[in-house]
C-alpha cells in the first residue's frame, strides 16, 4: 500500500491536484503499524474540504482517474482506493476523532488515518 500511495501522490502532484482524505479499515491499520496482514484496498471515510469532513459516496472524477491509473500501473484493482465506508459518517463519529487522526503525506495526497481507538468504535 505505501508504494501505491507514493505513486498516487506523485501522479496527483504532476497533475497539479491535491486531495485530503480520511482513511479507515485494514490498510489504515497496516499503515499505522498495528497489523501486518496484506490488504488489497484502502477505504476512504471522507474528504477534508475547508477543514470539514465531507462524505463522498464516490471519489471525485480526477481522483478516481488517478487511482485507476496507478492501479493499472501497479497491477492493482482500479478502485484500490475507494469510498466504500463513507456511510459510517451518517452514524456520527466518536468524540475527539479529528484530534486522534494520524497524518501521512504523499505528494499531492494528504492521508489522515483513523486511530486504533477509533477503529474499535467502527
Image (spheres, rainbow, N blue to C red):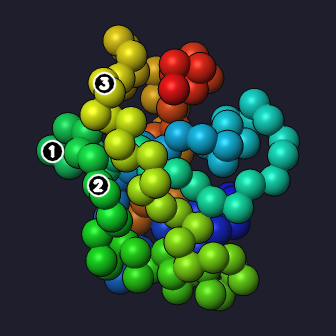
Q: Is residue 1 above or below residue 43?
A: below
How would you rate the neighbour count of disc 1 (Cα within 10 Å): few for under 14, some for 14-19, many for 20 or more? Answer: few
How would you rate the neighbour count of disc 3 (Cα within 10 Å): few for under 14, some for 14-19, many for 20 or more? Answer: few
Q: Position of residue 74 (x, y in %)?
A: 70, 81
Asked if marks 1 and 2 touch (Cβ < 8 Å), the reply is: no
Q: Position of residue 110 (x, y in %)?
A: 42, 52
Q: Residue 94 occupies which quadrant of the picture? A: top left
Real-space Cα separation, disc 1 to disc 2, in angstroms = 15 Å
Q: Residue 53 occupies which quadrant of the picture? A: top left
Q: Residue at x 46, y 21 (%)?
A: 100
Q: Quadrant of the N terminus?
A: bottom right
Mark 1 / mark 3, whichever is N-terminal: 1
Residue at the outermost left position: 50
Q: Position of residue 23 (x, y in %)?
A: 49, 44
Q: Is residue 5 left or right of residue 99?
A: right
Q: Mark number for residue 92?
A: 3
- SS type, badge 2: loop
Q: Is residue 56 above or below residue 9?
A: above
Q: Mark number for residue 27?
A: none
Looking at the rendered image, the disc whose residue lies closer to the viewer, 1 or 3, is: 3
Real-space Cα separation, disc 1 to disc 3, in angstroms = 19 Å
Q: Which residue is mark 2?
A: 56
Q: Is residue 102 visible?
A: yes
Real-space Cα separation, disc 2 to disc 3, in angstroms = 15 Å
Q: Residue at x 28, y 69 (%)?
A: 60
- SS type, badge 1: loop
Q: Mark number for residue 50?
A: 1
Amino acid at each position: 500500500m505505501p508504494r501505491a500511495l507514493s505513486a498516487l501522490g506523485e501522479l496527483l502532484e504532476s497533475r497539479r491536484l491535491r486531495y485530503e482524505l480520511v482513511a479507515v479499515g485494514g490498510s489504515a491499520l497496516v499503515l499505522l503499524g498495528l497489523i501486518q496482514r496484506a490488504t488489497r484496498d484502502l477505504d476512504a471515510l471522507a474528504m477534508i474540504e475547508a477543514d470539514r469532513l465531507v462524505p463522498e459516496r464516490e471519489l471525485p472524477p480526477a481522483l478516481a482517474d488517478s487511482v485507476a491509473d496507478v492501479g493499472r500501473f501497479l497491477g492493482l484493482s482500479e478502485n484500490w482506493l475507494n469510498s466504500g465506508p463513507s456511510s459510517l459518517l451518517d452514524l456520527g463519529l466518536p468524540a475527539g476523532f479529528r484530534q486522534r487522526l494520524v497524518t501521512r503525506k504523499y505528494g499531492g495526497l494528504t492521508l489522515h488515518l483513523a486511530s486504533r481507538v477509533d477503529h474499535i468504535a467502527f
